[in-house]
Every structure is written in C-alpha cells, then in structure tokens.
Amino acid sequence: MISFLYERLYVDEQINSLMTSGEELQSVYHNYDSESAFLWRVQWTDQSLGADVAFLTDEHPLISEGNSDNGGIHLDFVDATERQALESGETVVMLRNHPSYDQEILGVAVPLIESQELTGVILLSQPLASVYEPLGELRALALLLLAIIIALLIVTGRVISLEAIKPIQQMQHTALKMAEGKFQERVHHQPRSIELKRLGESLNYLAQTLEEEEKTRRTFIGNVSHELRTPLSYIKGYAEAIEKNVVDQKTGITIIQSEAESMLHLTNDLLDLTKLQSVTYTIEQEPVVFAEIVHDLITRMEITANHHNIQIQRSLDDAAIITGDAKRLEQVVRNLLDNAIHYSNPATTIHVSLIPWKDQHYRLTIHDEGIGIPKDQLAYIKDRFYRVNDARTRTDGGTGLGLAIVEEIIKKHHGVLTIESTLQVGTTVHIDLPEYIFDEVSS
C-alpha cells in the first residue's frame, strides 16, 4: 500500500518533472544559433532541476555512428525498440542500469528531430536510489509493524485475550481507512501491552506522514489550477483570435509561446517547491566549500550585471565550509543574485560578503541599492506566489515562488533567511548556515 501511494504521489511526479524539463528544452532547441549556446541552457536546467541532464549528439561518447544500412545515430544507452521510438519523435522513459555507473537510474530520453531525422537526444536521469530513498523510512516502519505483529503471535503461542484483540481490531480499521486514502484516521485505544502501544504509535506516525504528503499534493494541485488559469486563458483567447483573423498570426503565436514558457517555468518551480516541502524529502549533508560556489556564481553573473552598469563587490572568507547540498545551495545563491541584479538601479553596486557568524555559523549577505520593498509588504515577500505591486508583477517573468523555494532550501539546511529592505534605498538578504564540524580522529 505504501509503495503504491508513494509511486502515485512522488515517483510519477519525478517522471513528469523530467519529461516536462526535457520537452521544454526540446521546444527551445531550434531557437539557439549554435550547440554551444544550447549547452548553456542544458547546464542551467541540470543545475536547477536536481537531476543529470545531458545533450547527446553524434559527437557525444554515448552516441556513435551506427553500422546499420541506413546509417543514422546509434544510442548505446537505449535498445532497438526505444531507438525506433526516438527516431519517430517519441519521448522514452527508462528504468535500467546506467552504462557508466554501477546503479539503476530513472531516465527520460527526449528526441531532437531535424528534417525528419534524429540528430540528438536530451537525456535526463537520476539514480533510482535517490528517487526511492524517501520511501525507505516508511517501508522500514511498515516492516517493523509487521515484525512486531508476527513476534507477538509466535512468542506468546496462545490465544490473544479479548483486551488485546480490541486495539488490534482498531489498528486494522485504521489501516483499511488509510488504504482508502483517509489518512486522518488514528488509533485512539491505548492497550496495556507495551508492544501493542508502540505498534499503535507507529501506525499513527505512518498515518500522519501520509496525511501531510496528501495535503502537500492537494496544495500543489490547487496552486497549479489557480496560477495556470491566466496563461491558459491567454493561449485560448489568442488561438481563437488567430483562427478568426482578429490578430496577426505572428503576433498571436509569439504571445502564445511566451505564455507557454511561463507555464513551464511555473510548473517546474511548483514541482521543486512541493518536493522541498515534503516531509520525506532529504538533502545531502556533506562539507561544501561555500565561498567557491559564491565566487563562481558572481563571476558568471557579472556579465549580466555589467550589461546594466551594475558592479558586484565581493568580500568572502575562502575558508568557509558549511554542511549541506552543493547544488541546492547554488540554487539559493543564483536566485538571490538574480533578484539583486533585476531590482537594482543602474550605475549602482551589489555588495556580497561571507563571514564567520555566531554559534558556529557562516553568514552570507547580499545587499543591493535597488528599488526596495515597502515595509508593509516585507512580511509576506517569502510567501508562495506573493509579488510586490507595480515593479514586481506577472509580466516581470517571475513565478512568485523564488523566495519560497529559497526559504525551504535554507530550512532543510537548518539555516535562517532574513530580509531587510527600505523603499527606494535597497534590500539586504542574510543567510545563516551551520559551519561544517570536522570529526577529531585520535591517533
């Protein structure tokens, strides 16, 4: 039952997330002038998605010229049937061992077709172990419950008393309700037996976990329905206007494409936020040279900043090592730097510092000299879908989820995000993250 529910609520979501990102790349592939420019877009998706994203062509080691009579591209990673599907323009979902790593992966291959020929493939993949890892705790808990029941029957070797039967019957009733999707059910009867009491507590914990997952899923569906209504209305309206020759076809298609891009961006952000808010989702806990991540992102984003006559000054403690997930932390810094650049006034400076902080923490500070945030709206700026009026609107291109995602990532790292701002003066963002503590190994 747990495996079935998990695959419905999470594994299918992972597959859909990979397919959505792959098809988004497929839709914009022909808009790039060169493969190197498209590779930048692929790398950005790889860093933001949390999965491996590869752009495979005949020059890539996973793709080589085939020996078949009709030539074409041969993918060592897919079988003949899947290769035929890719050549027909179909997206392929795969569960198998990775050719380069000794582990099973979940993979999605999206074809790139030119002149009715397969010229490349976008391969998105992640280890199955990471996909199913959140299920391990729940599965272990279920096995523990089963083991306790079997142990009780075997060890006692006698008929269970009427007093012991009542709580078991209630547990059975609760389990059946959970199987029907009614995760709010709980075991209320408190048996005298310590073993049965622990069994009831474990079952209640399982029900609570599944109930929270169901709430997250329902919230996600509600948010998607609400936020996609506007772009879908635009797409429907302009499609009908083109059909009736009310608007110019080129203008209408441009608007439809823009709205579709917004929908894809929004959906990806929603999936990411839902994943982060899941009680079963965990992040990597390893030493990260945080200053190196910040240095690298500043260097990459200085081109955009300089284009707007904005300077970025940095003062970073290169010895800063924290505990966490490098990719998720990069996502945080990228989002905050992008906001600072986007909302800074021309001919101003963004100040970035990374210093030791109290209680064995490091503090990253990003201060801009931009338009600022009204004081009465500052308390809501981290809420999902919240946008400050006027300057920060839907037409700005944002989804209203960036800071909500940033805060969830910081929470997963046991850190603190604080934002200070003065209207028409600037905004200061502080992130406090725990320092990595090296274990002392006695010689």
Image (cartoon, rainbow, N blue to C red):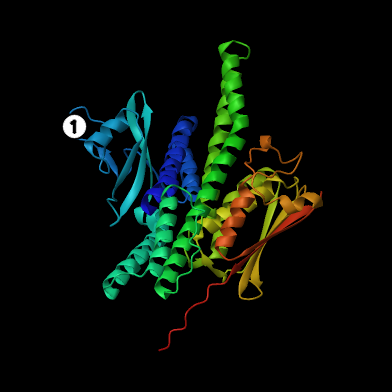
Residue 257 falls in image quadrant: top right
Secondary element at image label 1? loop
Q: Residue 413 at what x, y percent from top left? A: 55, 64
Q: Residue 355 at what x, y percent from top left? A: 65, 69
Residue 124 falls in image quadrant: top left
Identified at 29% across, 75% down, the residue is 156
Task: State whether residue 333 appears in this view.
Answer: no
**Total numbered circles:** 1
Q: Residue 172 at what x, y percent from top left? A: 39, 57
Identified at 62% across, 48% down, the residue is 402
Question: Which quadrant is home to the C terminus?
Answer: bottom left
Seen from the viewer's position, the closer of residues 128 and 165 is: 165
Residue 13 falls in image quadrant: top left
Residue 313 in the image: above or below residue 14? below
Task: State whether residue 251 appears in this view.
Answer: yes
User: Residue at label 1?
Assistant: 68
Residue 232 in the image: above or below residue 351? above
Residue 35 in the image: above or below residue 207? above
Identified at 44% across, 51% down, the residue is 177
